[in-house]
Image: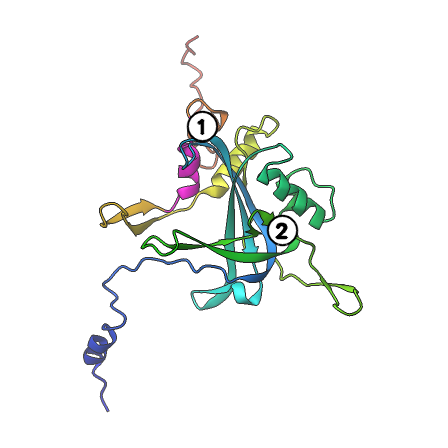
Amino acid sequence: MSINYGNIGNEAAKSDDMSVNKSFERELPKTGVAFLRLIGYIETGRHESFNKTYKPALKTQLIFELSNIKHLIDIDGKKVPQKFTLRMNKGMTAKSGYKKVFNMMNKALGGGHTHFFQMFGKPLMGDIYHNKTKVGTPDETTYANLDNEGAFSFRSPMKEDDLTGEQTEVKIPELHNKLQGFLWENETTSDEAYIAMWENLFIEGEREVVDKVTNEKVTKSKNWIQDLIMSNMEWEGSTCQALTQEHLSLDEVSLEKVPENKPVQM
């Protein structure tokens, strides 16, 4: 029996038209217990708040790997951990949410940490909650959070027996994703470390998205993290700008020798 691939293709295209560009929709993490590892801490500089009554603030992102079985997603036919990003203002007072998250994570990891970088890759547990905004309107949106009305859920990966109170360790799957970190204008970070962190943030390529205002498809760079940092209010004239926008890698250029018979201008 001969196969008419043309006819099969015509029918298949009704449900899988390969000429149509499809936008990627990120799946919302399911509610409930989450197995966590911190895989990213990125400071993006000072930005305006969505609420114009608030002053501009230093923004940070904490990126977690979610590896509980219900938080695995399909990427190219393989089940991999979802990522969850917690966006916060960087505040160092005891009442700031940023400091509360640091203190809770530090306690859950046994204490002794003085920076988020020191917590990279270590096992934690928490809970994913959902909340809705603009309920009952066309703009109703559901968000996933690691806190319930401001109370964060970070804890040690331990399970307590309801009857005996005995605690046993919960095995958190090994780290899957690469680590990423960036510090904004940190005085004790070396130039070499700054450049290495910056280059590790780079995302190559472009993607097609729908403009929310015009509803038209536009092409945007995938390199959104570096773009976000460069859009911050203090970028111009910063140490970060000087180091990352003007440095030349020795792997990319060769140093030219000054000819012996050519005088060097002073």
The relative height of residue 59 versus residue 72 in the rendered view (above or below) is: above
The relative height of residue 244 versus residue 106 in the rendered view (above or below) is: above
Q: Nearer the viewer, residue 56 or 61?
A: 56
Quadrant the C terminus occupies: top left
Indicate whether residue 210 is drawn in magenta. no
Quadrant the N terminus occupies: bottom left
Determine whether, in the image, residue 195 is placed left or right of residue 125: left
Question: Residue, x 73% and y 44% (percent of image)?
Answer: 111
Question: Residue, x 69% and y 58% (percent of image)?
Answer: 157
Provide the secondary structure element on which disc 2 rests.
loop
The picture quadrant where one finds residue 41 is top right
Can residue 176 be seen at all in this image of the molecule?
no
Q: Contact, CB < 8 Å: mark 2 with mark 1?
A: no
Q: Which mark is residue 109?
A: none
- Give whichever of discs 2 and 1 has the lower sequence position: 2
Residue type at the position of mark 1: Gln
Q: Nearer the viewer, residue 255 or 44?
A: 44
Q: Residues within 10 Å of mark 2 (few under 14, many from 20)?
A: many
Question: Residue, x 63% and y 41% (percent of image)?
Answer: 100
The colour scheme used here is rainbow
Q: Nearer the viewer, residue 54 or 14?
A: 54
Q: Which mark is residue 121?
A: 2
Residue type at the position of mark 2: Gly
The picture quadrant where one finds residue 90 is top right
Determine whether, in the image, residue 107 is placed left or right of residue 27: right
Mark 1 sits on what residue?
241
Instruction: Point out residue 89 in the picture as x, y percentages from the top left corner.
Output: 52, 37
Instruction: Point out residue 112 in the picture as x, y percentages from the top left corner.
Output: 74, 41
First to last magenta residue range: 222-235
Can residue 222 be seen at all in this image of the molecule?
yes
The relative height of residue 200 versus residue 259 in the rendered view (above or below) is: below
Farthest residue toward the front?
136
